[in-house]
Amino acid sequence: MDSLFRNTLGPASWFLLSLIPLALFALYFLKLKRQPLEVPSTYLWHRVIEDLHVNSLWQRLRKSLLLFLQLLLLALAMLALLRPGWQGQALEGQQFIFLIDKSASMSATDTVSGESRLEEAKRRVETLIDQLDSDMTAMIIAFAEQPEVVQEFTDNRRLLREALDRIEPTASRTDLTGALELADGFANPRRLLTEEGEFEVSEQEQVELYIFSDGRFRGVEGFSLGNLQPLYLPIGSFAAQNLAITALNARRGEERPDQQQAFVQVANFGEQPQATVVELYLEDRLIDAVELEVPAGDVASTTFALAEEAAGQLRARLDPPQSFDDTLRLDNEAYAVLEDRRDARVLLVTPGNTTLESALATERANRLAKVEKMAPAEMEKPDYLLQSQSEVYDLIIYDQCVPQVMPLASTLFVGRLPPTDLWKQAEAEPVFGPQIIDWERGHPLLNLIELGNVQIVDTLITKPPLGGGVLVDSTKGPIFAIAPRDRYEDAVLGFEIVGHEEDGTRTYNTDWPRKHSFPTFWLNVLDYFAHESSSAATHNKPDLPVELRINSQEETLTVELPDSQRREVQLERVGRLAFHETGQLGVYKVYSGGQVAKQFAVNLFDREESDVRLRVKQEGEDGVQVVDSLSIGYVDVAAQSPGSPVRRELWKLLLAGALVVLVFEWYIYNRRVYI
């Protein structure tokens, strides 16, 4: 009986409730309505005899449909208070935390009901909320790239249901770490250190942690559950299949540098090869469509030819065959931005450095920018002074020389410090024998760069001013740094590549030119500093901040989201815009003075999210697949079966039936009165 009913009232409440039917009987017999009415005497005596019969217990009960309906109404209400149902997942404990995954993969529609995984998770959480007793409390945390406390601990089931309704799907990847840290802050008491000793801030209580997710993320390392008692309830299926666009790039052709190309990659997360149509649009105009055969569990790619001066919004669209059950539609489109192309201008000021000049004279470098050369002595001429202060150049490289005044352009100093007091925070004398110990691999200037085997004779220490950052660090200190200056950036490479002695003899200060990373570095320099003036497709991840270089004198800009909503954004510093509201997939437009100053694209491009199949731990001899467990710290949280039943309660149906009975009783009562 414990599995069938869950009593919600105490003995005293049930005793008082049982008196209601007895009171109903008493009121029914005491409440006799007689209305004065003139009738013939023979009819009067006939009615009196009938009244005598009606006052008898049997006769009155036999003709009382209203009494029967009222007793049925009470019975249904009392039965609803017993909360009958059949056994499934039942809540055991006092405090509960529900973690609900709202990442991109939770928008897959492979549930039994045909709704999204997120809706299925919300429905299952709502079922558990209905089982909360009056002395139980629960909270709800939704997570994707970032966690969100939707509802703090409460015993109010109405507030929990309203919070559940507020959870919306996202296009972000999954990160369970932040959600666990939030839950840890509520569940595990902290220890307070005082002079008298160490004390617990609050009493330790176990908290039941329900994780509703499809498990499309890596395990959480170095996390201690403490008082959290985890329970993993996977949402989804093993047979879910999906076709996804995993890459969209615009670039110059290798064989024909004068022609632009769009590269599209499609992945098949299914068990059978699929043929699909890939369409490419430029500003909603169809460029071309290609049928692509994608092997099972593999990728295929295609290339589209674009016009030389193509510019605008580029969109690739996937059209899966009707026979293919594509469970996730978020990754069927991808976006890119082709900016108006103009040749970037770069000025190299050097006393003579064939190694550096050769790196900047390659065919690929010429595609990125037009590089001009000048001797340091020419910086005294009026032409240079005029051009350096007129924003003619996108980048000026000062090799072993320093200008008198900083130009109105981004700069890269080689073997010298900029002529500003902000950079002169270290000794001006070089240090000898530095060994590179670390470099910022994630910065665009050092993309695909390996510096661990580079030898350097001497170098200046480059301590950047406030707001800057160190890109390469050595045993002697930082030797490569970058810092903002108004709407420009100044990079400083502390060591010379090829130097000169006092007698004019050329010396080699480093063996870096012999490494493959040397020409790659200078291509990165041209691509990074000349990025605004080149035609390129840039991509950003959902819910991650985007930092842009904006050539605008206004302090407030307007960003238009893909759904046409607009946001006012303040420039953090001159020429730099940081935008954080990137949860939507598509193209974002940045307006300055009513004109579009910049555009950027946000795409999913995440194989973990696009592969929506539940992870399989093992497959037994009987062919039964088992969901892989979650790794949290040193604990493997076993997954329940994807179809694990939840407790089904009937009290809502019983109350609905009681409402129907009440309406029917009201109808019968009024019908007897007026007829």
Image: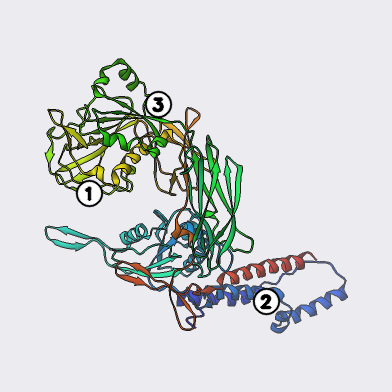
Q: Name the amino acid type tagged 1.
A: Asp
Across and down, in percent, residue 258 comes to 49, 37
Q: Is residue 149 above or below residue 482?
A: below
Q: Name the amino acid type tagged 3.
A: Gln
Which residue is at a point 55% across and 54% down the rendered structure image?
332
Q: Nearer the viewer, residue 504 or 236?
A: 504
Q: Which mark is residue 553?
A: 3
Mark 2 sits on what residue?
A: 68
Across and down, in percent, residue 657 comes to 63, 70
Q: Nearer the viewer, mark 1 or mark 2?
A: 1
Q: How would you rate the neighbour count of disc 2 (Cα within 10 Å): few for under 14, some for 14-19, many for 20 or more?
A: few
Tell me which label, 3 or 1, sits earlier in the chain.
1
- The answer to which image quadrant residue 281 occupies is top right
Q: CA distance from mark 2 to mark 3?
A: 81 Å
* Residue 467 shows up from this direction: no
Q: Is residue 654 above or below residue 330?
A: below
Mark 1 sits on what residue?
A: 438
